[in-house]
Amino acid sequence: MSLLLIAKNRDFSSLKNALLEKDPNLDVEIWPRFDNKERVHFAVCWNHPEKVLGNYPNLRAVSSLGAGVNHLLNDESLPEEVPICRLITDSLQDQMAEYVLNAIVNYRLNMNDYFENKQKGIWDQKSALPKKYAPVGIMGLGEMGKSVATLLVQHGYQVSAWSRSKKDINGVQSYAKDELNEFLSETTILINLLPLTDETEGILDLDLFKKLKQPGYLINVGRGDHLVEEDLIYAFDMNYLEGACLDVFEEEPLPKNHSFWNRKQIMVTPHIAAITPAKEAAEVLVENYKRAMSGMELLFEVDRERGY
Ligand code: NDP
Ligand code: OXD
């Protein structure tokens, strides 16, 4: 029985070592160098080639190598009865919370202007945006959203959140799905932490930006396809937004000639808001491999109907 690691252009050596350190009896193989398709019982995928999962007739479960699973749900070759799980760890949640806090502080304190001014030797003091004028709204209050909300509350931010169902988190004003407009009208700094589903694709558009308390600021750490990229530029032109920090993009790596690189208002990071360390990933993957082999319920199993 093999555990197969599948991704395009990824060095899996540290993950393979971590898996074998956790369980030396595992048979860990790396796509595409493995031909014995019948032996594969568990696959771990990130950005895998389309339809590749249909090649393994004895798959018992598939795990994402990250928190997002849209790449797996979109693979029509994966039989419906094969369960899908994802990878959530404490440090993934901590990193995400710190990334978002850092992006907010950079925005409030004009840090990106100072980075730029330093290159030119410009001394120009600007006033910071006080927290009380920077109410934060989080779209998606799941594993990542909850940890971001909790850290921001600890740091004295006014935090609200929008999710399918209302939640009870200390210090967070929670809005349910049908209360989106109310949520947006209370929000200046908007953080996207939704999963990518048919319902949420393209949700970050001009119509939504228009409803924010203006001028707004966008932090997109969900998925690139949540954002209608040209609407972001219109939103700057209309002063609905005055800046954005983007970690995820329609096309990754962000193409060299993409206009976002040269936009002063946009901070770009290369999909690094939260990355699971190999050792922690191995803990969850080995546990789920064992559960799948013995027919037990998986950790962090995805509801295929809901899409997350
Ligand atoms: P979860 O599945 O744990 O949470 C999803 C949240 O979104 C839930 O609160 C859910 O509501 C809400 N939601 C889903 N659909 C809707 C909808 N149609 N309307 C309103 N609310 C909705 O996701 P995670 O927290 O694990 O991940 C969030 C995002 O972050 C994903 O896109 C993931 O890919 C991305 N991510 C990005 C990383 C990066 O490095 N940039 C790293 C890790 C994750 P309810 O609770 O009521 O079901
Ligand atoms: C994830 C990601 O989903 O890195 O974990 O985006």
Image (tube, rainbow, N blue to C red):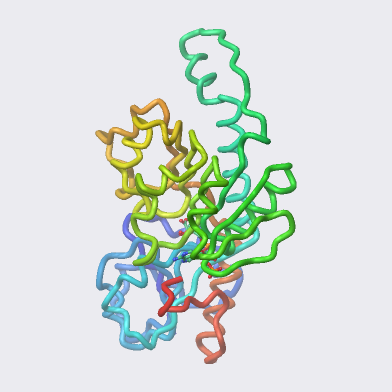
Give percent across and percent down for residue 222. Answer: 45, 54
Q: Residue at x 42, y 43 (%)?
A: 270
Q: Is residue 131 above or below residue 78?
A: above
Q: Is residue 195 left or right of residue 80?
A: right
Give percent across and percent down for residue 54. Answer: 27, 80
* Residue nearest the observer in this picture, 87 or 308: 308
Q: Residue furthest bottom?
A: 295
Q: Residue at x 39, y 61 (%)?
A: 200
Q: Residue at x 68, y 43 (%)?
A: 157
Q: Quadrant of the N terminus?
A: bottom left
Q: Is residue 122 left or right of residue 35?
A: right
Total marks drawn? Answer: 0
Q: Residue at x 36, y 88 (%)?
A: 58
Give percent across and percent down for residue 87. Answer: 53, 67
Q: Is residue 169 above or below residue 108?
A: below
User: Residue 12 falls in which quadrant of the image?
Assistant: bottom left
Q: Is residue 158 above or below residue 131?
A: below
* Residue nearest the observer in this picture, 203 or 82: 203
Q: Is residue 131 left or right of residue 78?
A: right
User: Residue 234 falls in which quadrant of the image?
Assistant: top left
